[in-house]
Image (spheres, grey):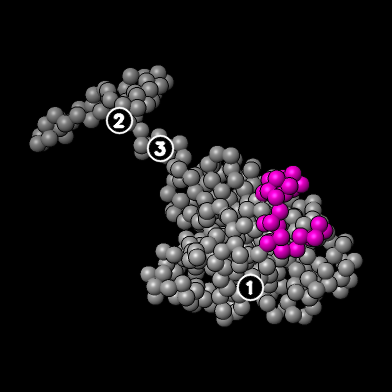
Amino acid sequence: MCSPLIVCVLLPRFELAVAAGGRAALVEGPAAVAPEPGRGAEAIGEVSRAAEAAGVVPGMRLGEALARCPALALVPPDPVGVQDAWEEVLTRLEGIGAEVEASRPGIACFAGGGLRRLHGGSQDGVVRATRAALRRPARIGSGPSRFGAIVAAERARARHAGVVRDADDLAPAPVGLLRRCEETAHLPEALERFGIETLGALAALPRSAVADRFGRPGLRAHDLARGEDTPLVPRSAGERLEEGLELEESASGAQLGRALELLVDRLLARRERRGRTVRVAVLSATLVEGGTWRERVVFREPLADPTRMVLALGRRLETLPAPADALRLSAERLGPPHAGGRALFDDGAAQRAARLREAIRQARAVAGPDAALRVLAVDPDSRVPERRVVLTPFEP
């Protein structure tokens, strides 16, 4: 029997709860996160339990969702608030020593085996430490793999952790849990149409038949149903620099462009940057009509040039769906020092001397041979000032 090693923390409907202003708002009736404006797709986000009971599921098109549940309340998406709240959750988990893998807000997994000696020598001690760190209701599960721990967390209750020990424990679970994996999220509906309702039924199918019908995602789902999963990839620790600007009036167009230039200048002037480049930047805004907007920009090469950063970020700013009350820019990942900084401090003495000689040559070509002179001490103790030093041509 395999001992559970992976711990999963599941915060159900996390994005919906943050966007709605708290979990208490989710019991008032069927609700769902509205499609993000400017994205092109009309698919809804997370849905409440009442909406699920009416047949509405995440990823469903807005028209179909309203047809199934006319009373469905649409909550404006709040990607900025979700990211801030989720970052706080991850920081609390890392505070107990966990190396956290966070694929999406609401689900975090980490290896619990190495934490047992820190928290009482048992898996229960790790679970207690996790609950104490979160300071909020959460479902916690453990299993031999990432997906096994997620299934265990789905079975868990507020005060009791779930446990999956092997593939046999996975067999009764519904195939709908495959939606928790991004690669297999679209498969449950098709599998249910074929009468495959449990992970055990999926695992019993011939592997070749699954591959022939569903391709690579089907093979991935078949592996998950048999208890096989890829290793965890914990997120790397990084520095986060952030600058914000409150806009006096609802800004758009040229006003936003000038605000962006100011934020870029402020961000690059931060002492914590220490001359390094910016690899990943996040541009976000608070919208006048409610909700927030967020864009993550990965530069093709690390940048420290404000002009190039404004050009790259300005294109994303054009997709802002409504006027904004506030604008925020953060450096999510920093790169190496920029080339100019290395040239000043990290070049060898020979290269610096070559640059200096070239600068002197150009100065003398313009201003004559006396353009670059050196002060040479001749008689420092002389009472006559003119005899203490002389000027001589400077030769590096």
- Segment tinted magenta in the rendering: 192-219
Seen at 59% across and 58% down, the residue is: 227
Label 2 sits on what residue type? Ala
Front in this rendered view, residue 354 or 167: 167
Label 2 CA crowd tier, 10 Å (few <14, some 14–19, many 20+): few
| Quadrant (top left/top right/bottom left/bottom right) for the C terminus | top left
Q: Mark 1 or mark 2: which is in front?
A: 1
Q: Earlier in the sequence, mark 1 or mark 3?
A: 1
Residue designated by label 3: 342
Q: Are marks 1 and 3 in contact (CB under 8 Å)?
A: no
Visible residue check, residue 243 = no
Q: Which mark is residue 155?
A: 1
Seen at 78% across and 75% down, the residue is: 50
For the stretch drawn in magenta, the main secondary structure is helix
Seen at 49% across and 64% down, the residue is: 2
| Secondary-structure class at tag 1 | helix
Visible residue check, residue 132 = yes
Label 1 CA crowd tier, 10 Å (few <14, some 14–19, many 20+): some
Seen at 53% across and 74% down, the residue is: 134
In the rendered structure, the answer to whether residue 275 lies left or right of residue 318 reads: left
Label 1 sits on what residue type? Arg
What is the spatial separation of the Cα atoms under label 1 and label 2, in whole angstroms?
66 Å
* In this view, 331 is above or below 51: above
| Secondary-structure class at tag 3 | helix
Q: Which mark is residue 384?
A: none
Residue designated by label 2: 349
Label 3 CA crowd tier, 10 Å (few <14, some 14–19, many 20+): few
In the rendered structure, does residue 88 fall within the stretch colored magenta?
Answer: no
What is the spatial separation of the Cα atoms under label 3 and label 2, in whole angstroms?
13 Å
**Residue 279 coordinates in the image, percent (x, y):** 54, 46
What is the spatial separation of the Cα atoms under label 1 and label 3, in whole angstroms?
55 Å
